[in-house]
Image (spheres, helix red, strand yellow):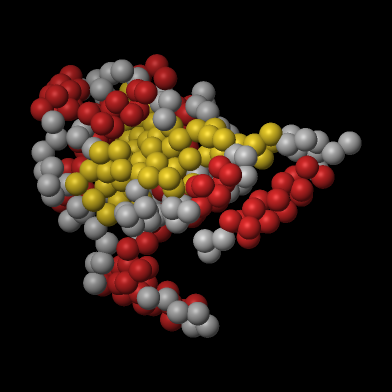
Amino acid sequence: MDDREAAHGLLEAAEDWLRQRGADKMMGPATFSSNSEWGLLIKGYEHPQMIMTTHAKPYYEPFIRAYGFRKAMDLFSWYYNLVKQPKLPTQITRIADRLKRQNCYRIYRPSKSGWDNEAKKALEIFSEAWHDNWGFVPFSSMEQRHLSSKLKPVIDLDLVVFVEKEGRPVAFAAPLVNVFQPLRHARMRANEFAWWQMMRLLWQWKVRRRVNSLRVLLMGVVKDHRGKGLDALMYREMFEAAKRKGFEHVEMSWVLENNSMMNRATASVGSDLYKIHRVYEKALQVVT
């Protein structure tokens, strides 16, 4: 609703609640973990919402700024079109080919039966790779189990890439099938039975195949193996597998604006910065 007074009333209520509990800073929009949905969309309103991302109307942003919030961090989303750009840049292909020829790293895809163990490995790599990044909170054991269970239905294991060095997992990338596409086609209505909604979703997703987009949500390279071209290798492996399965659109998100290495790597494959989500912060006066 395009109503500044209503928006500020909601923000004021949240601010009062936090202040009464001793908080000295308000930050968001965010869910309870930095490993989930974060940020207000400020660029790319015209593009459809991807799985596990937020969407917003353009008038939200001035409401938040007018209330006294300032930017804390921008989160970048990159887009790659597998149809219009069927071949990766020569430099990326050359790096990937060199690594495969050298046979220093083992590339593999997880099996369905070993998913729980592989998911644990992936989250351990991710935690190590992202440890020093702004806003990162390590996964608790409970969160690992929850995220593994939550993502399992929307991960196509044929597209997941793991990289090992002498038996040690050092890098991985995991795209999510954008289930929001078949969800839109399913045209859910209020007051319907949940089983009927699920049947319509599965019909659009599994039978009519109304999904051709992916989101690379989880990707990481451990610190001592960065700068060796593993990102190029994983992008090549992912994109080739995605094309074989009929996918056309790939979003890589989100990447912190100050993560220069990852942003350079993502841009180097020919992707475009097409969305920006912003996390805001506001200092609070503590009630004494």
Instruction: State the residue in front, 129 or 267.
Output: 267
How far across and how far down the image is residue 89, in percent?
A: 13, 31
Query: Viewed as shown, does residue 16 lie left or right of 49?
Result: right
How far across and how far down the image is residue 15, in percent?
A: 72, 46
Instruction: State the residue in front, 77 or 141.
Output: 77
Above or below, comparing residue 145 to residue 90 in the picture: below
Q: Quadrant of residue 260?
A: top left
Give the total number of marks visible in the rendering.
0
Q: Residue at x 73, y 36 (%)?
A: 284
Q: Residue at x 48, y 40 (%)?
A: 278
Tell me if residue 52 can be seen: no
How far across and how far down the image is residue 29, in percent?
A: 56, 46
Tell me if residue 132 can be seen: yes
Q: Residue at x 76, y 48 (%)?
A: 16
For the C terminus, which image quadrant? top right
Q: Residue at x 17, y 43 (%)?
A: 240
Query: Viewed as shown, does residue 212 lie left or right of 154?
Result: left
How far across and how far down the image is residue 181, in percent?
A: 32, 63
Instruction: State the residue in front, 140 or 133.
Output: 133
Q: Quadrant of residue 270?
A: top left
Q: Furthest-right residue in view?
A: 288
